[in-house]
Amino acid sequence: MNYQHQHIYRLTLTAILVALATCGASLFSFPIGVAKVAPVQHFINVLSGILLGPEWALLQACLTSLLRNLLGTGTILAFPGSMIGAFLSGWFYQHTKKLWAGVSGEIVGTGIIGAIIARPVAALFMGTKGAIWIFVPSFFLSTLVGSLVAYLFLKAAWPLINRCLIKQQED
C-alpha cells in the first residue's frame, strides 16, 4: 500500500473510531465521583492504539473528547485521561507487538497518569477541590472495564485482523 492509500486508510479508520467512541460514550456512561466514566472510550482507545499507532490514537482520543464536550456528554477530564491512555496503548503495542501491552498502556495512561493529571485540570477548569484518590478509582475502573473488553475482542478477532493487515501490506 502506498503512502497516500495508507494515510487515507488511517484517516478513515480514525474518523470511524471517533464516531463510535462519541456515540458509545453517549449510550453507555455513568458517573463515579466528579468524573463521567465511559468504558466505550477506553475500548476504542485500545483499538486505535493497536490498529493505528500512538499518533493516530492520540488524535482519535482528542477528537472524541472534543466532540463529547461539545455535545455535553463528556467533561474536560476526558482530555487528559483518554489522550494519555490512547497514546501509551499505541506506543506500548508498537514497541512489543503484544496485545496485553497495548491494553496495559491504556490502563496505566488513563487509570493512573491521566487520573493524576485530572486533579489539577479539575481544580483549574471545574473548581473541584479533591484529593487524588477521588480521581484514580473512577478513571481506573472505567479504563479497566473498557480495556478488558477490548482485549477480549481483539483476542477473538486477531486472526481476521492479522489477515486484513497482511493483505493491506501486500496491496
Image (cartoon, helix red, strand yellow):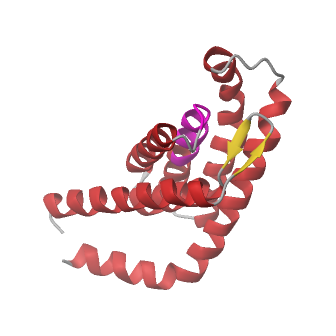
Tell which of 136 and 127 is nearer to you.
127
Dominant secondary-structure state across the stretch colored magenta = helix
Q: As displayed, is residue 120 above or below residue 72?
A: above
Where residue 69 appears, as percent x and y from the top left, is: 51, 37
> Left of 54 or right of it: where is 82?
right
- Is residue 27 one of those drawn in magenta? no
- Residue located 49% across and 52% down the image: 90
User: Which of 48/65 is in front?
Assistant: 65
Q: Is residue 69 left or right of residue 33?
A: left
Residue found 35% across the figure and 75% down from its top: 165
Residue 29 percent coordinates (x, y):
67, 54
Q: Quadrant of residue 135?
A: top right
Q: Is residue 157 left or right of residue 38?
A: left
Asked if 7 appears above or below 63 in the picture, the reply is: below
Query: Could you tell me if residue 102 is visible in this image?
Result: no
Count of marks, rendered view: 0
Give coordinates of residue 74: x percent, y percent: 58, 41
Residue 77, magenta (yes or no): yes
Relative height, residue 117 to residue 107 (above, below):
above
Image coordinates of residue 66 in percent, x first then y, are 45, 38
Residue with the most extreme front position = 72
Task: Please indicate whether residue 20 sits to the left or right of residue 129 in the image.
Answer: left
105 and 86: which one is in front?
A: 86
Q: In front: 127, or 95? A: 127
The quadrant the C terminus occupies is bottom left
Give the residues drawn in magenta, as a range. Answer: 75-86
| Quarter of the figure that contains the N terminus | bottom left
